[in-house]
Image: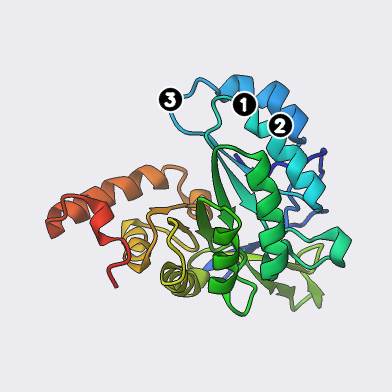
Amino acid sequence: MKGTTGAHREGNAYPRMAETPSGMLNAVGLQNKGVDYFVDTIYPQIKDYDTHMIVNVSGSTIEEYADVSRKINALEKIPAIELNISCPNVKQGGMAFGTCPKAASEVVGVIREIYKKTLIVKLSPNVTNIAEIAKAVEGAGADSVSLINTIMGIAIDAEKRKPILSTVTGGLSGPAIKPIALRMVWQVKKAVNIPIIGLGGIMNATDAIEFMLAGASAIQVGTANFIDPAISVKIIDGMIEWCERQGVKDISTIVGEI
């Protein structure tokens, strides 16, 4: 499930998406109807799906993270949350929770006390040392980390001489960030003992395999869905074909091979 916050959010003004070479920028702004709407309206519709539903949790204060996590914890059919610590901490001047080891550890520690099931923490790449952040959240009780979130960028319309996005800056995703994402997964794998979920520019099965070789136990696909809504199924099929061709009987054996 996409980012869920404490209260209803309309998100940022349009335009809030822009295509870029080998990727896209987005500044959607966590548009959602809030955790209570999720609990009352969305959850009853999805709770019996034969799959594991994971909710991405976002907030601007530790209290908001805690409120959302507490309400999601009460839902029997949600076995995990992904804590998005790339959000700006409004009580600390707007710096993202995930850019400071102390702030990252603090918010994860609070949520670990509240949330009793699998706690995945999504890391920001807009840091000097992502391995340091990963170690901090592992120490605070994270069961897993997912990386990377988008990288900050700008798109400009040269004819209008104005930024394309209403917010000026936005998060860059897609193939353009894949080499950075691979490097960060590789670095974090050497720093922590918890599983890593890799993401950032995965467009096909080969990309997915590369992330696993770098250290990811699982992968996420985002931007590619805008091009092909069936891409996840095609990636799985391609990974199976790769395993057969390579003689790999258990794909988990390739995790962190490089």
At x 81%, y 46%, the residue is: 63
Q: Quadrant of the C terminus?
A: bottom left
- The residue that disc 3 covers is 50
> Is residue 70 shown left or right of residue 122?
right
The amino acid at mark 2 is Lys
Q: Position of residue 119 (x, y in %)?
A: 56, 46
Whole-angstrom CA distance, mark 1 to mark 3, is: 16 Å
User: Crowding at label 1, few (<14), some or many (≥20) Cα neighbours within 10 Å?
Assistant: few
The number of numbered discs placed on residues in the rendered structure image is 3
Whole-angstrom CA distance, mark 1 to mark 2, is: 7 Å
> Is residue 247 shown left or right of residue 50?
left
Q: Secondary structure at mark 1?
A: loop
Vertical relation: 81 (above or below) 155:
above
**Mark 1 in CB contact with mark 2 (< 8 angstroms):** yes
| Residue 17 in view of the camera | no
Q: Secondary structure at mark 2?
A: helix
Q: Which mark is residue 71?
A: 2
